[in-house]
Amino acid sequence: MRRLWAAVAASSMALVGAAVVIGLNSQASAAVGGTGTGYLSTQGAQLVDATGTKVRLTGLNWFGMETDNKTFHGLWARPWKDHIDQMASLGYNTIRVPYSDDALKPGAQANSVDGYSNPDLQGLTPLQILDKVIDYAGSKGMRILLDRHRPTSAGQSALWYVSATPEATWISNWQMLAKRYANNPTVIGADLHNEPHADGTDPNGTGACWGCGDVNRDWRLAAERAGNAILDANPNWLIVVEGVSCPSGGNANVWNGQPTEPCGWWGGNLSKAGQYPVRLNKPNKLVYSAHEYANSVFHQAWFDDPTFPNNLPGIWDQFWGYLQKQNIAPVLVGEFGSTLQNPQDVVWLQKLMQYMGTGVTGMNFTYWSWNPNSGDTGGIVGDDWKTVNQQKQSILQPYLIPPVGGGTGPTGSASASPSKSASASASTSPSPSRSASSSPSAPPPTGGCTATVVIDNAWSGGFQASVTVKNTGSTTINPWTVTWTVPSGVALTNGWNATVTQSGTTFTAQAPSWATSLAPGASATIGFTANGPSSPAPSGVKLNGSTCA
């Protein structure tokens, strides 16, 4: 992930989400959990699965394979399956996996993998570790998007090739991967090259352009060559094409008197894709992708606009949003993130999530990043690789469509099933030793609690909801337990952010091992999917036995 600058200003209407207070009912656009069945294709701006069912990718990035380590970071901190279990339990249904071509070379060796935590990874090549991650993620109902992040582990490049990794190697490596995973629909496609961008200054730019016609610099033409070669090897994959930064391929030269073209984030400018579209032999496999970052990552001019944040939708419309809104092709916001230490960044992220929309028809996204060691943004988890950044997660949570169907978690969590009984449990704790009865109960909060229920999605025969509780008392609750009541006929199918179980019409959510305490003023959000009616909404929320207002 990196950035660049731009000089544009615009405004547009933004989508606004709504919460449901206890006892009320609301339904967003119809959606089901999960990422569908079989391989994915496109219908206009919508992703669909092999049955034609609408699908939305709501995932994150887990990086490391693009670095000198040549494999996922965090394998020095905890077992590799625990990472995936926690991602799935939080509601992320897709993992974007950055890699460099160095990790694919014969003799490449992964390093910084702890032998005690991950004995089954010792001695494996980067590709063999990737195989295991793909297989296990697939068992959780998740999808994998491969991202050629760097031509070498030394760093990113403006163009898709460098002297050590020419275009022919780039394409042949992609074809190798396409064939390797040709019979595994967990792997959905190829993000061809990360963040093509301008280099040099106009009018003598040497970086990636869009529609300029120079075969050595025109990223659109290169994407066509690589995309069609990959589809020859595996016709089922999606071809994900990022934008550039400046369409000319050169950075602005303020001294030459020429008009400054609109420039954006590296990989984030698709303003010319409508005029110069990527032409694939299978048009229904094309997905465009943009990257978008906050003011703390790089100070863009639009953050100074007096109408901020209401100017942002117009900027996004110009750079990439129009492709989705005009039903040209799906858009994947493949990277976006922040530490959220700057209050302006919080507003930016909230506005971006509203813009991308809720439900299965919203824009696809993969948040940057799972890793806490991303210097500009931090991660979903903290430096211990376990503790969830609740500020980030709370903003993202209403937009997540959790993975459903397939595999069991470390505590034996079950996949969604129409025949799930009312007494079944959907355990989502990433700790292999945690069970629904393993923790002693804490006293009720002194001073009480408040609660909100949101019906995030609803469809014929089921719904997705989230329950948020806030400790309004004066003491920390450790461990916390939340209960609520559902109408007769509602059956739990999946839960996340807690160990969620059901007994009759009572749902119980016990604190996950990575976030057992709830401090005064802190909130916890539990998500779940269920079969049955969404109306009346869940009610009677209690925190450690104390009824919440």
Image (cartoon, rainbow, N blue to C red):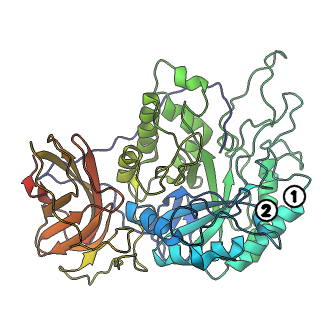
Q: Is residue 206 left or right of residue 382?
A: right
- Quadrant of residue 213 in the image? top right
Label annotation for residue 165: 1
Residue at screen point 55% across, 45% down: 336
Q: Is residue 542 left or right of residue 409?
A: left
Q: Are marks 1 and 2 in contact (CB under 8 Å)?
A: yes
Q: Amino acid at mark 2?
A: Asp
Residue 444 percent coordinates (x, y): 10, 53
- Quadrant of residue 225 in the image? bottom right
Q: Amino acid at mark 1?
A: Thr
In depth, the one of 155 and 94 nearer the eye is 155
Residue at screen point 45% across, 74% down: 140
Q: Is residue 544 left or right of residue 366?
A: left
Circle 1 packing at 10 Å, graded few (<14), some (14-19), many (20+), is some
Q: CA distance from mark 1 to mark 2?
A: 8 Å
In depth, the one of 190 and 70 nearer the eye is 70
Q: Is residue 33 above or below residue 160?
A: below
Q: Residue furthest right?
A: 163
Label annotation for residue 330: none
Residue at screen point 74% across, 47% down: 276
Q: How many marks?
A: 2
Earlier in the chain: of badge 1 and badge 2, it is 2
In depth, the one of 120 and 533 nearer the eye is 120
- Quadrant of residue 375 in the image? top right
Residue under label 2, please give it: 101
Element at badge 2?
helix
The answer to whether residue 45 is visible is no
Q: Is residue 534 left or right of residue 64?
A: left
